[in-house]
Image (spheres, helix red, strand yellow):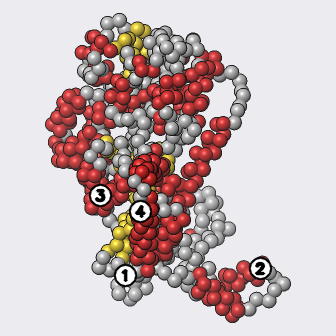
Amino acid sequence: MGLSTQYNLLVALFPDKVINKKDLSNAIQQFKKQAKPSKNDACQMLTELYLKKDEDPRWIIKPRFDVGERRLNSLFWMSPDQINAYGKYNDIVIIDTTSKTNQFDMILMLVIVVDNNFRNLIVAAAIIEDETEATFSWLLQELKNSCDVTPITLYSDADPALISAVKKNYLETHHFHCIFHIELNLRKKLKGKLHDQFEPFHAKFLAMRNSLCPKKFETEWKKLINEFPACKQYLTKVLYPCKNSWASFAINRNFTAGIQSTQRVEVTNRIVKEKLNRSSCLTDVVGEIQRIFDQQSKKAIISECKNEIPTRGIPSIMDEYFPNLDKILREYLTPQILQKQRDQMAQSLCYDTVLIEDWKPLLGITDDSYQQEIAREDDYDQPQSLFSLLVENIPHNNILQVWKVTRHRGQKSEPQYIVLLNDGSHLCTCLWLINRGVICRHFFRVMSYSANAQFHISLIPQRWYNNNKYNFEQHEKNILVSFHIGENELGDESEHPLSQLSFQHLMNFRQTSNVVQVQGPKQKYGFGMGYAKKALDLAIRTDKVDEFVDQVKCFIENTKAELSEQQENVISMHIGDPLKVQHKGRQPNRYKSCGEPQRKKSKHIQDITNITNKNCEEVVESQVDKKRERHCKKCGQPSHYAP
């Protein structure tokens, strides 16, 4: 904002005051000197981060420098609350990068998880200079070191550098690719080659992708290559090597919380870019990420507080048919997951179920006839697994009953099959319990007819529990009983001990642990305290307490000195800013000074007062302003030009 603009504003606000332009100019220059930081942007940002680490040593700050020029080229950081959140919800992680968030054109990478309220949560962030495999490997390793855990399921786009880095650093992680980005790449790479044949190709590609049987997938793949040879190079070199990252038969057996794409992190990127642009400094980037995380955490706290407020309304389906189940669900689940579970319970009344006495013929069905031109996961009532694949690793003598569930009144939908097992668990071909961690509507319908269909809160993954019940101990599980619709409970603890409700078959099918293993500060403290107590006991027995205390003091002083030296080295050394790219045009959101020329286009208002009667309000040609044209320099006429 220029001097003249500020002067006019002050005169309008304080008409009774005498304001001198020279005094105003001197005051502006004085405040500019005070507001101007003494350090460059990178050094200022690191100083602020290390001051936060002084207040709480649990902060993780990992900068990387260009050794030759002492220039910052990468930075990874996590706050203590983000570390705790990542330790709890590392079973589903989404990673994506975005640009145009700072004046140095450094790339911003966000790591998102889905918390127990089904909300996005930023658990880590980094600014990087490039998107190479080495850079991604460094970031993934720092993320792993933060809690000593690796993601169970990770979603990202199909960036070759990121794919290679995940394979090398996260050997046990299921890495899935965003189906939306795969669709975009297909249109970008193949539509120009196929032209009118792209839509038939796209339909057959989706049918192949939706195959539930790996053998059928391979058969459809070969047919697709033979029918569209122009796509062979892209399909075989780019998509086929990573087929287990986007094909339905490989994804649907893993817990993904219903995620198919990186849409959650794209939404967060949009929120970030509302405050950041190419003129933002690095300090603003760190502050904005922390502000968004704090805002996300507050929403979860407010939601849980609202859920604890007792309410009373008109009688619902829950009160009529599921009173005991709803009571225990309210006690354990967060509001968002509770609502999703209630929806499934209410929808169960829209289904019919039949007991299948002889289910052996179902094992021979190794194909399905699904031909819709959408992703199979988007079709609500479609099976996500074949019955034969559902029970292929389960001994047949462990199967108690098999039920067929269909919609009321013959509505067009494929039947679902519920398998009741002797360990108290169950499996359904919709895979809601496996893929989303929510008990499906088909099982609640079977509960109305079968005493073998038992509900226990342990069926729902612990990651969906509220904060009060998150640390669900084993002795608490033994107290709880299983429920059946129409009765309060199937029996007391002596008749139905939890040892028989091990849910082992369900755990094996899930391929992931039900309880998230957290290796955060609390667990590390307990681990270290055990050895400290043992060492102190031995010191007391051998009368070497003074020696033990001296060693502990020496360790404390050396560690403090090491941390202080690291911080002083970073703050005291001259850290250069990342290389700045100068873009054409003015910076976004920059006010023009009064001295800059204002290039405003002059508006020409046509005179339409003189109107003829022949062509209904036709403007007289002589009254219309002529369009500005280039004229010849020699003859002065338009439509041609000679220098």
Q: Is residue 141 above or below residue 127?
A: above
Q: Which residue is mark 3?
A: 137
Quadrant where the N terminus is found in the figure: bottom right
Tag 2 near tag 1, CB within 8 Å: no
Residue at the right extreme, as displayed: 16
The x and y percentages for residue 185 are 30, 49
Count residues near mark 2 (Cα–Cα under 10 Å), then give few for <14, some for 14-19, many for 20+: few
Disc 3 residue type (three-letter): Ser
Q: CA distance from mark 2 to mark 1?
A: 51 Å
In the image, 184 versus 270, the foreground residue is 270
Q: Name the amino acid type tagged 4.
A: Glu
As drawn, the label of residue 208 is none
Give whichever of discs 4 and 3 has the lower sequence position. Answer: 3
Q: CA distance from mark 1 to mark 3?
A: 59 Å
Badge 1 element? loop
**Reading the chain from its start, which is encountered first: label 2 or label 1?**
2
From the viewer's perspective, is residue 359 above or below residue 298? above
List the residue tagged with mark 4: 547
> Nearest the camera: 495 or 390?
495
The number of numbered badges drawn on the structure is 4
* Residue appearing at x 76%, y 89% in the figure: 19
Q: CA distance from mark 4 to mark 2?
A: 76 Å
Q: Nearer the viewer, mark 2 or mark 3?
A: 3
Residue under circle 2? 12
Q: Nearer the viewer, mark 4 or mark 1?
A: 4
The 10 Å Cα crowd at callout 4, few under 14, some 14 to 19, many 20 or more, is few
Residue 279 located left or right of residue 28: left
Say which label, 4 or 2, has the lower sequence index. 2
Q: Which residue is identified by label 1? A: 641
The amino acid type of the residue labelled 1 equals: Tyr
